[in-house]
Every structure is written in C-alpha cells, then in structure tokens.
Amino acid sequence: MRLRLRGLWLTLGYLLAAAILFLSLYPFAPIETLPRWTDKVEHGLTHLILAGWFLQIYHGKRQWILVSIACLAFGGAIELLQMLTPARAAEWLDLGADAVGVGLASGIAFSRGKYLLEAVENRLLNSNWKTA
C-alpha cells in the first residue's frame, strides 16, 4: 500500500531532522549528574527515530540503503558542525551510536514495523469523525 499523506509524513520528517540539528548545536548547559554514556543513548535513540521515520516512507532495498547512508551522513555533519561550535564538543563515538540507531531502525524496516505510518494513516483517513 502507498501512503496517501506522503507529503505530510515527509514534511514532519524534515521538521524532525531540523529539530535534531537545532538541539545538537544549541549551547545547552550540560547536566553534570548524568552518566557520560547517556549521551550515546541519546544519539542512538535519535537516529533510531530519524531513520525509522524515513524508512516508514521509503520501503525499497535501494531506498533503505540511501536513507541509512543519509542518516549517518547527517550524524557526521552534526559532529563536524559541533567542532565549529564553541559550546559543543564533537565526539566520533557519537557517530558509532548513530550507526547503532540506524541499524536498529533498519531491522525494524524489515519487519511489520515498517507499516506503522500506514496504520496511522488508515486510522486517520478511515475513521468516522463525528462532531457534537
């Protein structure tokens, strides 16, 4: 089945990427009480969500590879931009955590999980909206 609201889903995905970029470069004060490894979990989850979102839209094998590469390149670009940002620090291990997230999203993309947006769309478009 094809997504009927594909443009909406793509727009939301690009807004998600823009939010990730902003939050990655904004000079937030670090939370000193959190263990150092939580940063890697954040990177993994962020790229799991980002790649998972776009893999909901693009299902072909070639598209899967391109989305995965694009998400990893996006993570690498963020690390490069963080080198230029005085308040942020680039860490190449973050890119490894990004790769883990993309890998998990890819695993989901080959399961029934790749039909989540279609299920949401069907629910939205096929429900009987009643006004009071």
Image (tube, rainbow, N blue to C red):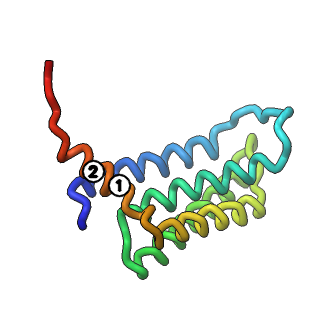
Dot 2 amino acid type: Glu
Do the numbered discs 2 and 1 sit on residues whose CB atoms are within 8 Å? yes
On the image, numbered disc 2 is attached to which residue? 121
Residue 88 in the image, given as x and y percentages of width and height: 74, 45
Residue 129 in which image quadrant: top left
Q: Residues within 10 Å of mark 2 (few under 14, many from 20)?
A: some
Residue 93 in which image quadrant: bottom right
Left/right of residue 14 with respect to residue 29 in the rendered view = left
On the image, numbered disc 1 is attached to which residue? 117
Residue that extends furthest to the bottom in the rendered view of this protein: 62
Front-lying residue, 38 or 16 = 38
| Residue at the spot 47% in from the left edge and 47% down from the top edge | 16
| Residue at the spot 66% in from the left edge and 65% down from the top edge | 100
Front-lying residue, 73 or 100 = 100
Q: Residues within 10 Å of mark 1 (few under 14, many from 20)?
A: some
Left/right of residue 75 with respect to residue 88 in the rendered view = left
In the structure shown, which secondary structural element does the residue marked by tag 1 occupy?
Answer: helix
Left/right of residue 20 with respect to residue 126 in the rendered view = right
Quadrant in which the N terminus is drawn: bottom left
Residue 73 in the image, given as x and y percentages of width and height: 57, 67
Mark count: 2
| Residue at the spot 27% in from the left edge and 50% down from the top edge | 121
Residue 37 in the image, given as x and y percentages of width and height: 81, 50
| Residue at the spot 56% in from the left edge and 48% down from the top edge | 21
* Vertical order, 73 against 25 (above or below): below
Dot 1 amino acid type: Leu
Quadrant in which the C terminus is drawn: top left
In the structure shown, which secondary structural element does the residue marked by tag 2 occupy?
Answer: helix
Cα–Cα span, label 2 and label 1: 6 Å
